[in-house]
Amino acid sequence: MENQFTRGGAMYKKVDIKDYEYLKNIVGIENTLFENEVGHDYHKDELGGISNPPDLVLKVDNAFQISQIMKYAYENTIPVVVRGSGTGLVGASVAMHGGIMIDMTKMNRFLDLDLNNLTLTLEPGVLLMDIYKHVEEQDLFYPPDPGEKSATIGGNISTNAGGMRAVKYGVTRDYVRELEIVLPNGELFTTGGKVVKNSSGYALKDLMIGAEGTLGIITKATLKLLPLPKYSISLLLPFPSIELAIECVPKIIKSKAIPTAIEFIQKEVLLYAEDFLGKKFPDKSAEAYILLSFDGNTLESVEADYSKVANLCIKEGALDAYIVDTEERKKDVWSARGAFLEAIKASTDLMDECDVVVPRDKVADFIKFTKELEEKYKVRIPSFGHAGDGNLHIYVCKDGMEESKWEKVLEDVFEEMYSRAREYKGLVSGEHGIGFAKKKYLFEQIGDVQIGIMQGIKSVFDPKFILNPGKVVK
Amino acid sequence: MENQFTRGGAMYKKVDIKDYEYLKNIVGIENTLFENEVGHDYHKDELGGISNPPDLVLKVDNAFQISQIMKYAYENTIPVVVRGSGTGLVGASVAMHGGIMIDMTKMNRFLDLDLNNLTLTLEPGVLLMDIYKHVEEQDLFYPPDPGEKSATIGGNISTNAGGMRAVKYGVTRDYVRELEIVLPNGELFTTGGKVVKNSSGYALKDLMIGAEGTLGIITKATLKLLPLPKYSISLLLPFPSIELAIECVPKIIKSKAIPTAIEFIQKEVLLYAEDFLGKKFPDKSAEAYILLSFDGNTLESVEADYSKVANLCIKEGALDAYIVDTEERKKDVWSARGAFLEAIKASTDLMDECDVVVPRDKVADFIKFTKELEEKYKVRIPSFGHAGDGNLHIYVCKDGMEESKWEKVLEDVFEEMYSRAREYKGLVSGEHGIGFAKKKYLFEQIGDVQIGIMQGIKSVFDPKFILNPGKVVK
């Protein structure tokens, strides 16, 4: 059987010319890329190290096309991977088994902005940055704020993306009201509704959120919106050390102020961002910073909150407190923060990332631990992250290290970090997901019972294991 | 095989004296009720019509006991139902197949109030009213606010209970950070953590929430808390008609004020509550009312919100606007609201409830429709509910109707209501769940594809169908 082969234990059919002919008729030849036409961008996502070409890329326009593609793929046991902007960091949208890649970026239409119910219905290929623009025109607010604004909302839902405003507003999961899904066998269903409450059977909508495209394909989503807060002010607090800075965070939380975001910044990373952006940060006299934002509908309430936090932090060792209230200054500060990932990436030849989340009062200890690992393994490990919600982004940098040594160092450092996160009762991923790269650490953390259940759930949705095979669960 | 029998297609073993001897040793004889010792309260939940005795009641003290019980039940294929306070309204905790009932009410300990992470870890048998008291002592706030304060938190999580403050604060799901679960085969696992973000594998925690005790047994939970808002004020708005009252609600939402709660009240139901409580409501001059609450950390922001809403509603036809700001007055108003269910119950010999949730801008139409049904079927259908989140509580009252006629009327009225809810893109249950009583309407709504997936998920968790069989899914 020439066109059959074993990949990962399953018998997948390789896409051949007959499949190509059939599938290109669904989306049109102008939306089909076959074999050599498939560009390198489609082989990988945003973090290096994991790469494989799909046999065929189909740029879809609607759910019906997706349903037809899946019916065919299901009948013929062809693996299918769904891709948005490809900004993922764990290889979740890499076609590890080849097959069909469905490119969702053309499904980027806004369908309904409902002012009575404060909801936005849209296609999964809409970019995060376009959502903000679209709803702010109506004085509305989509709170989730992941760093990568060119990600699609479908990708955000599939990873349960978090971002900076999670301290006050929660994560993507908290803003998804309804999903339309195409199953691996091509069937379509809708789960949830334009409703606040839902106790109507098992939480299939929530199961789809964060499933990284392994259970079904999101073809439409309805998001919950909030009124846009009238006032928003940021506060930049310099500290003599990163430990002192981060140790303030649980105290801020305990003080019952509710910041929108609490980010920690290390001078080292700030300097990379200045280099990368070619732009100066307003202050770099200190070793470390906490950057906070506050929002609300009266100036009084916002001022009360930030004054309380500024006073508290100065008492706890902050060197000063800069109020960032002009639009220009806000842009300077937050664009530096927004460039950290790209800046660290530009500072080295290769890196890998650890996206653990730990209880808020363990963040300082965890960062201290990464400094010890830097010493122990003689490797650079810059980090930044969401001090307010315990989610860290830690980068192990290759810096030209010899390949075989690098692999060993990376494995050992990762093993130590994830094992320490488990000790602190943290989790493997706060917002980037498991994908292909972090499966080992998920398995180590949650053990056979939960993995067994997850694999069982996978089989229920996708009995032939054709949809994004080899991701999240085996 | 004398001790084997078929119930609902599955072969369950009837609890015999040997089982009793084994199981009573796990929890102690003082915590065991067998056959005739099982009181009538254990046969049913809060809404009439569904009743069946368990063979054995076991009052458990800890997760280890539960794990041992489940191992035994699994090996012997004995059905098991978990019960908290028994305040459910859809028969979810009724032992329809007999077997073992696990009474969780003794597992009611607070385990950890973590001020650094703003979380509360507790056992599932803690009552909702005790949670409020416990956290308010620390100036903290558990936002979900279901009407029935003597429900257990385990029950609240199992139904994804909503309540009145959902408009601003969301539902139980939004406040569950971590769950410890015993599976039907006795295995134990923990899902989630004391963390804000989580993208670590499939959302098993979310799947457990709202599963009505059919997938696993919750033995410990960690809840997210918020700082207690400093100010809280209610606003009572009389209207000449219920339609006019409810039609204001989408306009309030559109105005971008964010009330904590928006309830609608009909004069008829108010009078039942006065009778039931033997206490006068502050005003009953009008046909209908909207009752709102607002909270915040500055008086200015709360005042700004309620003034805006009061002015808007007066423009839209409200007869007046009463500000309810003293503790005593607040208690008068909200205790009347809290008594509606019991008051309607006391007004008739038997009733059944419809807990649909519809988009906010369909609430007025839906209530109008129930009035038409009252006329058409010559049956009393009082209602109240959460206008702000689209969740209605509608009661069809028997009022001494002849039994066979009642059954037909109830079936027809329910069929019409759920079918109208589907038209409005609403869902079968906003907060009370599906349990035994609403399965038919869930099936009609979501169809074979989703039901098939839900049944598949049930099989993954509970391959022998011993845990709360016949609930939610077949």
Image: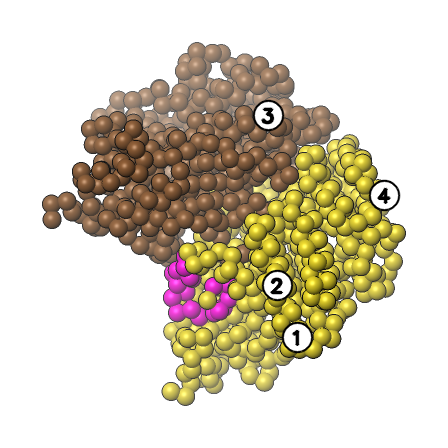
Chain colours: A brown, B yellow
Q: Chain of mark 2?
A: B
Q: Between disc 2 and disc 1, whose residue precedes?
A: 1
Kindly identify which residue carries mark 3: A137
Q: Was residue A369 drawn as part of the magenta stretch in this picture?
A: no
Is residue B108 among what the camera can see? no
Kindly state the secondary structure of the residue where label 1 is placed.
helix
Q: Are marks 3 and 4 in contact (CB under 8 Å)?
A: no
Q: Chain of mark 4?
A: B
Kindly identify which residue carries mark 4: B319
Residue B414 - label: 2
Residue A172 - label: none
Q: Chain of mark 3?
A: A
Q: Nearer the viewer, residue B433 or A112?
A: A112
What residue is drawn where x is 16% and y is 47%? A4
What residue is drawn where x is 65% and y is 29%? A229
Q: Which residues are magenta?
A: B452-473
Q: Which of pointers 3 and 2 indicates the residue nearer the eye?
A: 2
Q: Is residue A295 left or right of residue A61?
A: right
Kindly identify which residue carries mark 1: B405
Please state the horizontal and vertical placement of residue B444, each as a whole percent of the image: 51, 60
Specify the amino acid type for callout 3. Glu
**How much space separates mark 2 and mark 4, taking CA atoms?**
34 Å
